Image (tube, rainbow, N blue to C red):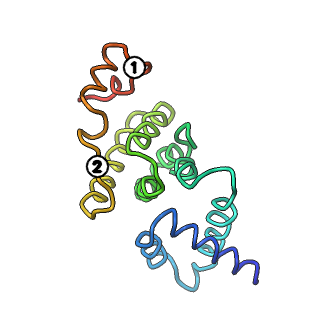
Amino acid sequence: MSGDSNLYETGMKNRHAAMGDTYVKQSLEGGSNEYAFPNQQMGTGWCWQKMWSRPSLELSQRSMLSETKPPAEHIGILMALKAWPELGAHVRGAVSNGLSELEVREAILQASVYCGVPAGIEATKVAEAVLNDMQEKGEYRRQSDGIASRDTRSAARSGAVEHPAEDMVAE
């Protein structure tokens, strides 16, 4: 049992670092009681200690997988599952771990090809709501004009930028 306890304790440190204290506290309060605790313990130990402690990826890269560059396996998984609250939590964690809102948006666009446009539209709404909430709380400062400057968009339209994602997004 001592090994399980160590997995859980180390996992909790990683979970707090990746997702933030507020989210972890709310998650534990909302779904942890004596009956549910073994599931929390298993998930925290395996996910947050065993996987998130591996040395080959940075926290921001794990956030993309779980929310590596190239984008967006976990964001895509959550989109495919239509797990919108969990997607929001992982967008918050990804940004807190150093991903830019551009990288989050590109991950959503990439996953939209496989998950479908309606899922991409909903994921974009979730991500934008999270980014706005983070800004309102002083946790994050939104980039001007949502992401790309008008000069970047102009360059993309003129062909100066290869593979412009902006052409895929309505203004």
Q: In the rendered structure, which amino acid carries the disc numbered 2?
A: Arg
The N terminus - image quarter: bottom right
Q: Quadrant of residue 167?
A: top left
125 to 41, vertically: above or below: above
Secondary element type, mark 2: loop
Q: What residue lies at 57% left-to-right and 78% top-to-bottom?
A: 36
Q: In the rendered structure, which amino acid carries the disc numbered 1?
A: Val
Secondary element type, mark 1: loop
Label of residue 149 in the image: none
18 to 131, vertically: above or below: below
Q: What residue lies at 63% left-to-right and 60% top-to-bottom?
A: 52
- Between the C-alphas of marks 1 and 2, the distance is 23 Å
Q: Residues within 10 Å of mark 2 (few under 14, many from 20)?
A: some
8 to 48, vertically: above or below: below
98 to 11, vertically: above or below: above
Q: Residues within 10 Å of mark 1 (few under 14, many from 20)?
A: few
Q: Who is closer to the viewer here, 78 or 62?
A: 62
Q: What residue lies at 35% left-to-right and 50% top-to-bottom?
A: 126
Number of marks in picture: 2
Q: Position of residue 170 (x, y in %)?
A: 27, 28
Q: Position of residue 42 (x, y in %)?
A: 66, 71
Q: What residue lies at 37% left-to-right and 16% top-to-bottom?
A: 160
The C terminus - image quarter: top left
As drawn, the residue found furthest toward the top would be 158
For label 2, the residue is 142
For label 1, the residue is 161
Q: Is residue 41 left or right of residue 135?
A: right
Q: Is residue 107 left or right of residue 169?
A: right
Label located before the other in sequence (1 or 2): 2
